[in-house]
Image (spheres, rainbow, N blue to C red):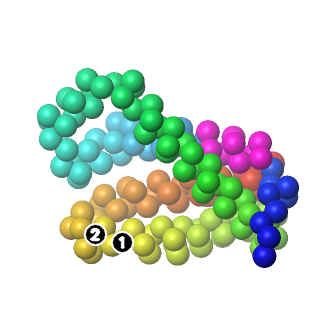
Amino acid sequence: MMIDLSVINHAAVFVSAIIAFFVGWLWFSSALFGNMWVKLNKFSKAHMNAAKKKGMKGMWSQMLLSFLSSVVMIYVLALLLVNVGATTIGAAVVLAFTVWLGFFAAIMINMVLWEGKPFALYLISVGHHLAVLVISAVILVMW
């Protein structure tokens, strides 16, 4: 099977990745789940102070890699949407949920089972992925 990227709306993928980045920024900000995420990860004051000291300058490479990983994920999502013939918002949401359930929720539960992470941390993380997948899928089929 050949992967044909010519069937993908590259602008929609790029815009979706930018929106996904901002969804992550909001999701992990103090306005939503950021404070709880920090607490559940048990980051020390020293860790947080070091991160604040680095500021944005120290985070550029992490943000770039995060953005690029979103681009890859959204390209794969776009290919799935095209190949299953999902052209409606409803079909996009169902596919996004199915991908999330099988590839995020099911796999990431291991952070609770084997790494001893709190279930609430799992919910924050998988919730973020669900939001990004659904928003991206809707953008891709509407564009």
**Front-most of 97 and 111?**
111
User: Does the stretch in magenta take in 14?
Assistant: yes
* Spot occupied by residue 133 in the image (x, y as percentages of width and height): 59, 57
Instruction: Please state if 17 lies on the left or on the right of 115 as rendered.
Output: right
Residue pictured at 33% horizontal, 25% vertical: 55
User: Does the stretch in magenta take in 104?
Assistant: no
Residue 109 marker: 1
**Front-most of 22 and 10?**
10
* Spot occupied by residue 125 in the image (x, y as percentages of width and height): 40, 57
Range shown magenta: 10-18
Q: Is residue 86 above or below residue 134?
A: below
Residue pictured at 23% horizontal, 51% vertical: 41
Residue 112 marker: 2
Q: Quadrant of residue 4?
A: bottom right
Callout 1 environment at 10 Å: few (<14), some (14 to 19), or many (20+)? some
Label 1 residue SS: loop
Residue at the extreme front of the image, as rendered: 2
Residue pictured at 74% horizontal, 63% vertical: 79
* Spot occupied by residue 128 in the image (x, y as percentages of width and height): 47, 54
Amino acid residing under circle 2:
Val
* Spot occupied by residue 76 in the image (x, y as percentages of width and height): 66, 61
Q: CA distance from mark 2 to mark 1?
A: 5 Å
Amino acid residing under circle 1:
Ile
**Residue 135 seen in the current view:** no
Instruction: Please state if 69 lies on the left or on the right of 53 as rendered.
Output: right
Residue at the extreme right of the image, as rendered: 6
Q: Are marks 2 and 1 in contact (CB under 8 Å)?
A: yes
Label 2 residue SS: helix
Q: Is residue 126 above or below residue 48?
A: below
